[in-house]
Image: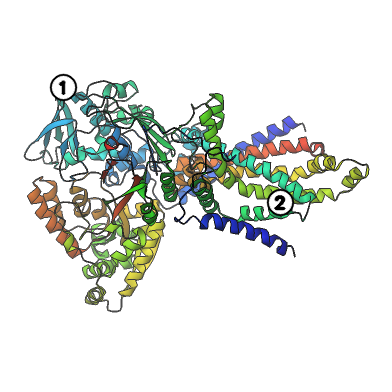
Amino acid sequence: MKLNRVFPFVMLVILLAGILTGCGSATTPEVQSPAGATSAPAEPTVAPTGGTLVIAMNLDDVVTLDPAYAGETTNLFIHINTYDTLVDIRPEDLNTIVPRLAESWDVNADFTQFIFHLRKDAKFASGNPVTAADVVFSWNRLLNVAGAPAFNLDGVGKVEAVDDYTVKVSTTVGTDGKAQPLPQFLSSASNPSLGIQDSKLVKEHGGTDAADAKTADKAKEWMDQNSAGSGPFILTKWSPKSEIDLVANKNYWKGAPKFDKVVITHVSDPTTQLQMLQKGDADMIGNLATDLVDQAKADPNLTISVDQSLDENYLAMAYQCPDAIKAKNPDVFKTLQSPDSFAIICKKEVRQAVAYAIDYEGIAKAVLNGYAARAPSIIPIGIIGVDPSKTQGRDLAKAKSLLAAAGYPNGVTLDLYYASNATRDTVAAKLKNDLAEAGITLNLKPLEQSVYLTQMRAQQLPMAFGGWTPDYLDVTMWTDYFGLGDRSIAFRMWFQNADANKLATQIRTTSDPAIRKTAVEQLQAIFIEEMPFTMLYQSQYVHAFSKDLKGFKFHPVWFVDLSGLSK
Amino acid sequence: MSLIQHLTRRLLLMIPMVIGITLLLFVVTHIVPANPLAVILTERSMDDPEAVKAATEKWGLDKPLPEQYLIYLENLLKGDLGTSFKTKNPVASDLKNFLPATLELSIGSFIFAILLGLPLGIISATKTGSFVDHFTRVISLLGASMPPFWSGLLILFVFYYKLGWAPGPGRINSRIGAPHSVTGLFVFDSLLTGNMPALWSSLSHLILPSIILGWFTLALIARITRSSMLEVLSQDYIRTARAKGLAEKWVIMSHALRNALIPLVTLVGLAFAGLMSGAIMTETIFSWPGIGRYAVEAAANLDYPAITGTTLLIAIVYMLVNIFVDALYTIIDPRIRAG
C-alpha cells in the first residue's frame, strides 16, 4: 500500500548513486572543485613543501620497531632506512655483497671466522662515532634478547671487538669440537635487523646486551618510537596501525637524503591507496593490487614499476608413507590428519601427477592477473643455479598415465590443508578443479591460520598449501629449509632424502659460486623428480608512484631505499 | 532505595559479572585446537626445541589451565591485563593506544545519529506520509541494509575520490600530523593545544566514517522515535494539552517527546556501546587505528591476553552504559524511582 509511495524515493537514491559512481569510469577528466566554492568541510589545502614524502601502505604487520624484537616484513623497510648494516645487497645486483659500514672483510677458508673492518667516518644520528663496540653491543643484544630476528645470528658463537674499528665474528662450536661453517653469514649480515645500534643511546634508554637481556633489557618502549642508528633517516614517531614518521639524518655519512620528512601512513584497502595516490594525498603506495593496474596505468600522472619478488606459494606433499612414519615416530603417527591421503600422496608418481595436473598459468591469472612467474622447483627465479627453461607446466595426459602407473587408474581422493584467506581460497578452488580433470578428487580443508601452523609444524598434514618469503638473499634460504630433512618445511612434510640432504649440506658449507651453482642445479633436479613441493607461483609486485618521484628501485627483502628517492 | 544505593549495588554486581566473563573467555579460547606458540615464536624458531621450551615457560603455557586462570585473575586484580603474545606490549597499554580512536569515532557517529535521527523521527511522527517521512524511511532502510564495507567504499569513492568534498582515510592529514597528545582524541587535543589546522583536519576526517558507522544507529533512532512518538501522540493527555490551547510546538516538545524518550534512552545507550564494538569494518575501510582491528587480529592470532583484555573492556563499557541508562530513566521519569 505504502510501497508505491516509497518506491520513487528508493529509485531516486539508487539513481543518484548510479550517476555518481557510473560516470566515474575513467573517461571524464576530473574537474577540481575550487577551494571554498562549497560549504562542505573539504581538507584545508596544505602548501606543498616538496620536503615531505607521503607513502600509503598497509602497516598491519608492524608490532614493534625495535630491531631486536621485530620479525615481520614492514619493519625491514623501516630499519634499512634508519639503521646501517655492515654489508649490503643492493637492488641492482642481488647476488653480490657490497660494503656499507664495513669497508672490507676477511673470511677464513672454512667460513668459521669473519673479520669486518669498519669505515672510520661513519657517525650515528646522535653524533656518536660508529665503532666496533657498537657492533658487538647490537648483535649481542639481538642474541640475548632472543626476539624474533635473533635467528639471523643462528650459528654465530662470539662477536668481539679486536680494536675500535675491527670486529671479529666466530661461529659456534659443534658437538665434534669444531667450529661450524656459516657461509651464508655475509648475506644474513645484510639483513636490516642486523643494523648497528648506537650503544650509548640504547643503554641510556635501558638497553643492555648482557646475557640476561631477555628480562633486563628495557629499551623496547623507547626503540619503538625512536631509532638509534646511523642510517639516512631517523624514526620520530610510530602510532600503531596508523602512521610512521621519519625525518632526514642531515649528517648522514653518505650525504643527506633529498626528502626532509617521510610519513608512512597506514591504509589497508588497495583501492583507497590508489585513490590517495591519484588525489595527490600520497606520493607512493605499497604493492598495487593487480586488478588495479589498468586503472593506474591509465593515469598519466603515475609511474608504474613491475618488479620480480622472491615470494612464492607452494603446494607441499608428504614424502613418506604412514608405515615409515609409524616406525620413525609412533606418537606423530597417531596424530596424522587424513592418513588415507598420506598413504596415497607418499607415492612419487602421485606427487608427480598432481604437479602435472595443475594449471599454473590459470592460477597466476586468477589471483594475480598474470603478474607472476614460476621456477622449475621450489628455488625461485633470480637465484644462482636456477634455470627457468626447466620449468614444467601442465600435462594432463602425463598426469593420468602417472596416476595409472601408481596403481590408481580410476583416480584418487586427497585432502588439502591450508590457512584460509581470500587468495588461498581462490587458488584452492582452482586446484580442486584442475586436479579433477586428471581424476584426482581434492577435498579442501581450510583452517584458521593458527590451527594450520600448529598441525603443519607437528608434521600432521599430507598436503599443505603455503607461502615462503626470504629473510636474506642467500640460496640457503631455500636449500636449507626445503632440502635439509631436519629443518622447517622439509621436516614438516617428511622430506628426508639422502641425496638432497647431501647437496643442501654442500651448499651450506661453501661460498664458491661455481660449486654452489652445480649443487643447486642437482638439487633442483631432485626436487623435480621427487616432487615433494611444487611451486604454484612466484609473485611479481606492481608499484605505483607519482610521476615526479625519481629513483625508485625495488628490493625483494626491504622494499625501497628512501635516501635514493627525490622529487 | 535511593539512587546512590541503587548505583552502588549495580556497580558491585559488576564484579561477579567480570569474573564470569573472564572464566567464559578462558574456557572458550582454550578449546580452540591450536597452539599459541605459533604466534609467539617465529617460523624458524619453532624448529628449535629449546626456544619452544623457553617460550612455553615464559608465557606460562606449561601450567595446568585452572592455574593459568588463577594467575590471570590475580594479575587482573593488580590491574595487569597481561602481555600480548603478538605485540609483546602490555595489553593495557595497547588498549590505551587504540581506545581513543574508537572513542572519537563512536562519539562522532553517535552525535551524527542523534542530531539527525531524533528530528527525522519526530517530524515523521507528526507529519506521517509527508516527504520527510518517506525520506526517513528510505534512509533508514538503506542504513539498516547496506553493509559498511560496501557503503564505506562507496562513500569514499564518491565524496573523496570523485567530488573531493571530504578528505580520505585516516584520522588526520598526513602532511599536518597529529596534534600533541593529551587525551588521544584528536579533535579535543587540537582544541586544547590551539592547533587550528589539526582541528579542522581531524574534524573533517571524522565526517565520512561517522556517517557510515552511525547510519545504522540513525535508522534505529529515527524509527523508534517515530513509533514511540505516534503512540504517545494518541494518548489522552496529549488531547487534553491540545484542548487547553497549548501551542503545537509545546505539545510535541514538552508533553510528547519527554514521554516518548524512555524506550529511546534504552536503545541509545545500547547503541553507543554497540558503536564501540561494531566499528571493525568502518575502522578497516577508513584506516582508523581503533580497538576493532586490534580485537580481530587478537582473535586470528589466538592472542589470549589481548582477546580477554579487549572483550573485558567492551563488556565493561556495556555494563557502565547500562547503569548510566538506568540512572537516566529515573531522571526522565520520576515514577520509575518511586516504583
Residue position marked by numbered label 2 in the rendering:
B223
Instruction: Pinpoint residue A259: horizontal percent, then vertical percent.
Output: 33, 32
Reading the image, the residue beneath label 1 is A164
Q: Give above or below for A559 relative to A419.
A: above
Q: Where A541 falls versus A243 (above or below)?
A: below
Where residue B257 sits: x, y (%)?
Answer: 79, 42
Q: Residue at x 12, y 58 (%)?
A: A522
Label 2 amino acid? Arg
Q: Is residue A546 left or right of residue B2?
A: left
Q: Chain of mark 1?
A: A
Q: What quarter of the picture does the N terminus of chain B occupy?
A: top right
For badge 1, the amino acid type reads: Asp
Query: Can residue A183 be seen from the camera position used here?
Result: yes
Of circles 2 and 1, the one toward us is 2
* Crowd class of label 1 (few under 14; some 14 to 19; many from 20; radius 10 Å): some
Crowd band around label 2 with a 10 angstrom C-alpha radius: few (<14), some (14–19), many (20+): many
The quarter of the displayed image where residue A203 is located: top left
Residue A353 found in image quarter: bottom left
Helix, strand or loop for disc 2: helix
